[in-house]
Image (cartoon, grey):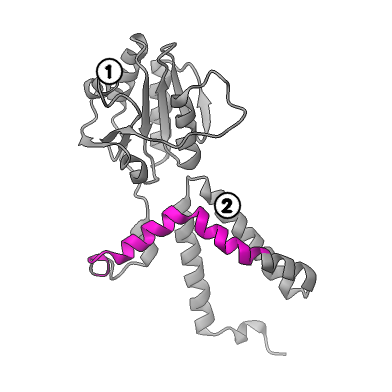
Amino acid sequence: MIPIFLHIRLLDVIDILLVAILLYSLYNLLKGTAAVNIFLGILAIFAIWRIVKSLGMDLLSDLLGAFISVGFIAFIVVFQPEIRKFLLAIGSPGFVKKNRLKFLFWKLHFKQEDLIEIDPIVQACHRMSMTMTGALIVVSRKNDLSEFTDTGMALDSQISDQLIESIFFKNNPLHDGAVIIAANRLKAARCILPVSAGSNLPSEFGLRHRSAIGITEKTDAIAIIVSEQTGKISYCKDGHITLDVKASGLKSALTEDFSTSR
């Protein structure tokens, strides 16, 4: 009997490596978002389908095969923003020139952000808490938030506690919506965020708290809320919210999250 590994061709090895690279790149593209769980679920179903098919379990194989066929349409719907971004990237005039030696999906890797200036954010939140000024600040980590910054007013300025406070001053036309900070820059204000549809959220949560939970459910960003009614600071990460955070606790949480994500 000829050992099975002698039947493996060089093209088979290349095929496996390319698929592995593709899946790893897709995982990096979606990492930190809620979509990654759907992606892993699709991979698990596909792996089970291949196993039962190789074992000759025809009925279960046909059932899973039909699910995967329909799941392809669901895949396009769920990952529409990522697919759109990929197509825009490869359709840009300078894409080939800039990426001759790169695999296509490396173009879309979300770069890891530099450690943000934490003190101005903490100081602004502390003073807005004292004056009961409502605020919603979103700080990007690895995921690109351009689809949300595009909904607001572009600023691209240095992070400043005075600037943050002035944005959320009640007579400022930019005070509604969220401020988004990314790459150690204050990117945009008056941004519209996805609102969490969770049915188990406390009834006293307003739009700011629900938006903070919504953006952290869909991305790996950090959201900070200052309540206009109570002046209390809340800290939101991974769809979970911590209420009544003191300034010292806010600084510790930001320092920990942005030092461990490097």
Residue 46 drawn at (x, y percent): 64, 64
Q: Nearer the viewer, residue 16 or 60?
A: 60
Q: Which mark is residue 38?
A: 2
- Residue 169, numbered label: 1
State if disc 1 and disc 2 touch (CB < 8 Å): no
Secondary structure at numbered mark 2:
helix
**SS at mark 1 in the image:** loop
Q: Pointer 1: residues within 10 angstroms few (<14), some, or many (20+)? A: some
Using the rendered view, name the quadrant where residue 130 is placed: top left
Q: Is residue 21 above or below residue 252?
A: below
In the shown orientation, is residue 104 left or right of residue 67?
left
Quadrant occupied by the C terminus? top left
Q: Which of the marked residues, 2 or 1, is nearer the chain's N terminus?
A: 2
* Residue lying furthest bottom: 1
Residue 157 location, x and y as percent?
Answer: 20, 34
What residue appears at the point 37 percent right and 18 percent down from the top-left corner?
134
The N terminus, quarter of image: bottom right
Q: Tell me where residue 75 appears, x and y as whole percent.
A: 54, 59
Neighbour tally class for label 2: few under 14, some 14-19, many 20 plus, Cα within 10 Å: some
Residue type, label 2: Ile
Residue range highlighted in magenta:
67-96
Q: In the visual, does 43 lie left or right of 218?
A: right
Q: Could you tell me what secondary structure mostly forms the magenta stretch? A: helix
* Alpha-carbon span between mark 2 and mark 1: 40 Å
Question: What is the quadrant of residue 129 in the picture?
Answer: top left
Q: Say if the magenta span includes residue 233.
A: no
Q: Nearer the viewer, residue 74 or 86?
A: 74
90 within the magenta span: yes
